[in-house]
């Protein structure tokens, strides 16, 4: 990647899962949190020090099942972080139970006769919650994945990358060769990702799974930390937030 970021400028925040173990292999700050909770921790880190590049790495179970409440709300808050969901359509760490992205009919330990639940699409949910950057990558295409991750990290606002990452141990249906047959790489000449409604239509109506940049707002609004912090140029710890600086009279005028 060409981001020219030093390890001490980056924090990787993960939950629990095979995917979330990535903090152990990543040369930067890492916070391996608890199941489904990397987003609130990442939000707090970004607010405490907006100069840091904060990346959440998670799984489809961690991010879209137990973490789903945080998902929608972190997106609508538009915290300037990148979330990468390693979507293998199973709970890999706990030995292959079906997840919210598992296809209808998917056989697993907890669904021996096939899942009878409809899968969710993390990209479509992110679009409806107001995300200003939504992409889908395929881990079998390293070059494209790297370029999508780079664009996501550069994006000023919440960025989602749903990375199709086959689990070679517990998902014998959605394999690398299955994806090669079933994805459609978005060509820059034929698809323009600046329209939210068109992006939704693409996700809902494509026969094959669209892979690439699905939506990016041309003029993203100010991020959550820019809206709530007096100064995003230095960490909160160096800012003078002492009560004597507060202007009580102006604050009280609101309640008169
Ligand atoms: C509160 C809580 N509930 C359940 C678990 C058990 N558990 C650990 S990882 C996991 C699912 C992981 O799936 P995913 O996020 O898709 O990661 P993967 O291993 O597939 O990469 C579950 C249910 C837990 N650790 N904590
Ligand atoms: Mg998983």
Image (spheres, helix red, strand yellow):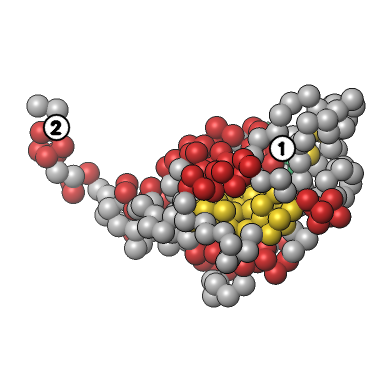
Residue 25 in the image: x percent, y percent?
A: 72, 61
**Residue 103 in view, yes or no:** yes
Q: Is residue 215 left or right of residue 139?
A: left
Residue positioned 41% across, 50% down in the render: 47
Asked if the residue at label 1 sits under 8 Å from ligand 2, the reply is yes
Quarter that holds the C terminus: top left
Question: Does residue 51 lie above or below 48 as drawn?
Answer: below
For this orientation, the residue located farthest to the front is 190
Q: Where on the picture, by quarter, is residue 201?
A: top right
Point out the quarter of the image occupied by ligand 1: top right
Q: Where on the picture, by quarter, is residue 177?
A: bottom right
Quarter that holds the N terminus: bottom right
Camera-side mark, 1 or 2: 1
Q: Is residue 252 left or right of residue 174?
A: left
Question: Does residue 150 lie above or below 249 as drawn?
Answer: below
- Identify the mark at residue 10; answer none if there is no mark: none
Residue positioned 71% across, 55% down in the render: 184
Residue positioned 64% across, 50% down in the render: 162
Mark 1 or mark 2: whose residue is earlier in sequence: 1
**Residue 22 in view, yes or no:** no
Location of mark 1 (residue): 101
Foreground residue among 140 and 180: 180
Q: Where on the picture, by quarter, is residue 70?
A: top right
Residue 237 in the image: x percent, y percent?
A: 37, 55
Residue positioned 67% across, 63% down in the render: 145
Residue 163 in the image: x percent, y percent?
A: 68, 53
- Give the secondary structure at mark 1: loop
Location of mark 2 (residue): 254
């Amino acid at each position: 990647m060409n981001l020219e970021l030093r390890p001490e400028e980056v924090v990787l925040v993960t939950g629990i899962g095979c995917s979330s173990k990535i903090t152990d292999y990543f040369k930067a700050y890492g916070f391996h949190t608890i199941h489904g909770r990397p987003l609130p921790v990442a939000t707090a880190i970004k607010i405490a020090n907006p100069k840091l590049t904060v990346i959440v790495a998670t799984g489809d179970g961690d991010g879209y099942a137990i973490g789903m409440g945080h998902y929608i709300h972190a997106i609508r808050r538009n915290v300037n972080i990148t979330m990468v969901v390693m979507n293998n359509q199973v709970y890999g760490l706990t030995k292959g139970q079906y997840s919210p992205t598992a296809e209808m009919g998917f056989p697993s330990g907890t669904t021996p006769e096939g899942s009878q639940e409809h899968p969710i699409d993390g990209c479509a949910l992110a679009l409806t919650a107001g995300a200003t950057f939504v992409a889908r990558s395929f881990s079998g295409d390293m070059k494209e994945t790297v370029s999508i991750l780079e664009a996501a990290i550069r994006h000023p606002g919440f960025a989602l990358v749903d990375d199709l990452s086959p689990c070679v141990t517990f998902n014998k249906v959605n394999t690398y060769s299955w994806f090669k047959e079933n994805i459609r790489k978005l060509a820059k000449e034929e698809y323009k990702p600046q329209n939210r409604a068109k992006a939704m239509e693409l996700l809902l109506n494509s026969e094959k799974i669209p892979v690439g940049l699905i939506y990016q707002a041309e003029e993203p609004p100010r991020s959550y930390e820019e809206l709530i912090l007096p100064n995003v140029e230095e960490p909160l710890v160096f800012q003078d937030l002492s009560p004597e600086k507060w202007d009580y009279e102006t604050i009280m005028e609101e309640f008169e």
